[in-house]
Image (spheres, rainbow, N blue to C red):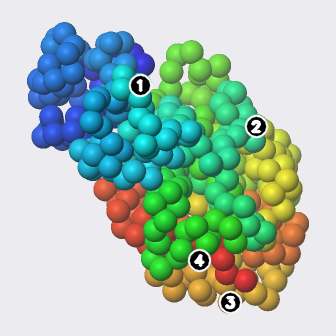
């Protein structure tokens, strides 16, 4: 992480501001501007944690902040400690501490030994969700919830790992993915927060919305690829960097006259990933002219051929490996669920779509125009003749503000759980 001081701006400043606010040190806005209020909050944090109180987030200060950003503190066992007392002091549960420390014996705590104490939320849903944050949160999941299967399904154009997380061991397999489109990055924290809430409920033996999570874990297997387009997401959230190998091309491809943060849906090569699947791809290519599309750009360019992009090939190959009963592809915006493709969806798709509609309050609909072709949901329905759905979350203009997250999550938690069990 770069050094942060007065005058620094960016998504990393938002991370620090949000953490300091959660810890009670900062009361100002989470605006990504490192001003005097942020510096004063950093100084207070530094004093409490035995650091030099210079108001600068350098390597030492960030080293202390990083575990907290990952949702935990490292605690040294003292005489008289019990896991119950430690859990009570941190406002967490014994079950979460034991899960994060495999092999720990509550009756034989070793004085002076260090343990991980999970107590903060890992997924921060008040900030821009970059690929760097995604990676750190996934590493936190590995540490705090070691029963999760986490891996890479492949890499993006720029070599970023396309991570998947597996929840459960049941025969009923489903696959959810998010952020095919760069502006629609809000779908990634939606899926990541779902993973965190699911894992926490599993550890603590709790239900969510009436679903017994431990029972669900044995009945169904949920695979989630939370960020299909990490290169595009970082372009939108962090801006175009001079060291980007496509720097000059991206400047040429963005002919809108507007910043990437307002217009860019495609991957880093200007290909719209949700128009790059081999499902009426030729129709999508032929429709480009109607929209003034002649090559790579912010949106709707289908690429030179189906599956020309590594990201779509990764999603395709992961789908083949999972062989899911049902898929959900998360997008924004419109609060709508698309369920059909060229009338190839099986009969149960309408019934399941209606149930998902009731669970979320989103309308059930069918796509028209160029949006009807070459998407992931389209390819899955064509390839498998099984239920596939595109879920468009939120309302407004992309990128949706993170302030919509609580409503989006509340609308979709029940849908995500229902999709994992519905026959």
Residue at 49 percent of width and 41 percent of height: 105
Quadrant housing residue 53: top left
Q: How crowded is mark 3: few (under 14 residues within 10 Å), some or many (20 or more)?
A: few
Residue at 33 percent of width and 12 percent of height: 60
Quadrant housing residue 370: bottom right
Residue at 42 percent of width and 65 percent of height: 408
Side of 266 where 341 appears, left or right: right
Q: How crowded is mark 4: few (under 14 residues within 10 Å), some or many (20 or more)?
A: some
When the figure is inspected, residue 295 is found, relative to residue 383, above or below; the finding is above
Which comes before the other along the chain, label 2 or label 1? Answer: 1
Q: Are marks 4 and 2 in contact (CB under 8 Å)?
A: no
Side of 387 where 214 appears, left or right: left
Q: Mark 1 points at which residue?
A: 113
Which comes before the other along the chain, label 4 or label 3? Answer: 3
Please say whether residue 38 is visible from this viewpoint.
yes
- The quadrant the N terminus occupies is top left
- Give coordinates of residue 248: x percent, y percent: 61, 21
Q: Which mark is residue 351?
A: 3
């Amino acid at each position: 992480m770069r050094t942060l001081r007065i005058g620094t701006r960016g998504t990393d400043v938002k991370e620090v501001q949000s953490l300091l606010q959660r810890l009670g040190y900062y009361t100002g806005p989470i605006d990504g501007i490192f001003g005097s209020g942020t510096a004063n909050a950093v100084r207070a944090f530094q004093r409490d944690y035995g650091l030099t109180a210079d108001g600068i987030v350098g390597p030492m200060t960030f080293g202390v902040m990083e575990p907290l950003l990952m949702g935990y503190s490292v605690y040294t066992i003292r005489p008289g400690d019990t896991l119950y007392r430690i859990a009570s002091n941190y406002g967490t549960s014994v079950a979460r501490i034991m899960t994060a420390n495999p092999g720990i014996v509550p009756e034989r705590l070793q004085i002076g030994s260090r343990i991980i104490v999970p107590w903060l939320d890992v997924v921060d849903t008040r900030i821009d969700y970059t690929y760097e944050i995604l990676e750190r949160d996934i590493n936190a999941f590995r540490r705090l919830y070691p029963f999760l299967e986490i891996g890479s399904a492949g890499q993006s154009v720029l070599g970023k790992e396309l991570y998947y997380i597996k929840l459960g061991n049941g025969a009923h397999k489903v696959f959810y993915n998010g952020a095919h489109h760069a502006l629609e990055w809000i779908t990634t924290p939606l899926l990541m927060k779902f993973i965190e809430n699911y894992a926490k409920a599993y550890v603590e033996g709790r239900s969510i919305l009436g679903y017994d999570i431990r029972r669900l874990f044995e009945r169904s297997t949920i695979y989630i690829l939370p960020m299909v387009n990490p290169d595009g997401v970082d372009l939108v959230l962090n801006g175009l960097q001079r060291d980007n190998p496509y720097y000059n091309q991206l400047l040429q491809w963005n002919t809108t006259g507007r910043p990437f943060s307002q217009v860019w849906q495609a991957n880093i090569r200007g290909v719209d990933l949700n128009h790059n699947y081999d499902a009426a791809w030729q129709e999508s290519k032929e429709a480009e002219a109607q929209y003034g599309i002649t090559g790579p750009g912010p949106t709707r360019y289908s690429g030179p051929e189906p599956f020309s992009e590594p990201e779509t090939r990764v999603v395709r190959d992961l789908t083949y490996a999972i062989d899911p009963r049902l898929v959900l592809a998360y997008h924004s915006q419109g609060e709508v669920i698309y369920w059909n493709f060229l009338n190839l969806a099986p009969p149960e798709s309408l019934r399941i779509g209606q149930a998902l509609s009731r669970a979320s309050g989103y309308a059930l609909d069918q796509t028209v125009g160029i949006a009807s072709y070459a998407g992931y949901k389209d390819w899955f329905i064509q390839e498998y003749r099984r239920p596939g759905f595109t879920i468009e979350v939120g309302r407004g203009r992309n990128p949706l503000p993170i302030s919509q997250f609580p409503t989006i999550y509340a609308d979709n938690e029940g849908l995500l759980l229902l999709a994992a069990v519905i026959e």
